[in-house]
């Protein structure tokens, strides 16, 4: 198992549950991952949102991807830190690939309310019922 297996799983199951911290209160919400490749798992959000404020204050996150299947299915859990990317070309690509952002009030790639972030370094592992009672034995992928 290596990072390419993680990228493939994330790409096939892009709905991601992202856990952040709000003081001492955990917060979890679903994100539609933008894309994943060998450089990380990419997302976007709006700077007026509380999730952006939480990530700026504490960039540590855990991502959870889930593929339903017989039994309990399979999850991939990823821990790491968020990196915010202020890259005009990347934001332009985002607007091209997700034009619906313009429909919800983003004025374009240079809108200061648009934030792109990724998890580029961390550790991932796959969970199935096989590891239910021995989770820390599941093989890890460091990236």
Image (cartoon, grey):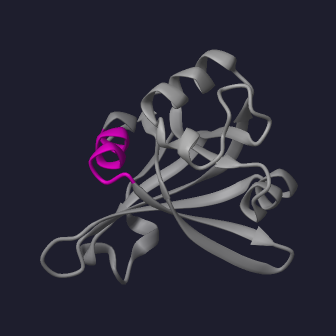
Q: Nearer the viewer, residue 119 or 130?
A: 119
Q: Position of residue 64 (x, y in %)?
A: 46, 63
Q: Is residue 142 magenta?
A: no
Q: Main secondary structure of the magenta part?
A: helix
Please provide percent x and percent y for residue 114.
70, 39
User: Between 81 and 17, which is closer to the camera in this rendering?
Assistant: 17
Total marks drawn?
Answer: 0
Where does the image place residue 62, in percent across and percent down from the top left?
A: 59, 61
Q: Quadrant of the N terminus?
A: top left
Q: Nearer the viewer, residue 63 or 110?
A: 110
Magenta span has 8? yes
**Residue drawn at (76%, 52%) of the image:** 59
- Whether residue 143 is visible, yes or no, is no
**In the image, what residue occupies the spot 26% across and 48% down?**
12
- Specify whether 21 is left or right of 10: right
Residue found 68% across the figure and 34% down from its top: 107
* Residue situated furthest top in the rendering: 89
Residue pictured at 62% horizontal, 26% vertical: 91
Front residue of 73 and 124: 73
74 to the left or right of 33: left
Residue 44 in sight from this viewpoint = yes
Highlighted magenta segment, given as a residue range: 5-14
Question: Which x, y percent locates residue 135?
Answer: 42, 73
Residue 75: quadrant of the picture:
bottom left
**Where on the picture, by quarter, is residue 122?**
top right
86 is higher (above) or lower (below) than 130? above
């Amino acid at each position: 198992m290596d990072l390419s297996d993680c990228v493939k799983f994330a790409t096939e199951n892009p709905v991601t549950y992202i856990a952040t911290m709000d003081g001492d209160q955990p917060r979890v919400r679903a994100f539609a991952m933008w894309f994943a490749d060998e450089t990380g798992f990419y997302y976007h959000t709006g700077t007026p949102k509380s999730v952006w404020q939480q990530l700026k204050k504490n960039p540590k996150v855990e991502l959870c991807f889930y593929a339903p299947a017989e039994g309990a299915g399979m999850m991939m859990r990823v821990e790491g830190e968020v990196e915010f990317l202020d890259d005009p070309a990347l934001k332009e690509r985002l607007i091209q690939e997700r034009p619906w952002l313009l429909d919800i009030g983003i004025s374009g790639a240079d809108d200061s309310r648009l934030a792109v972030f990724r998890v580029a370094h961390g550790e991932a592992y796959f969970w199935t019922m096989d590891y239910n009672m021995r989770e820390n034995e599941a093989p890890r992928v460091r990236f």
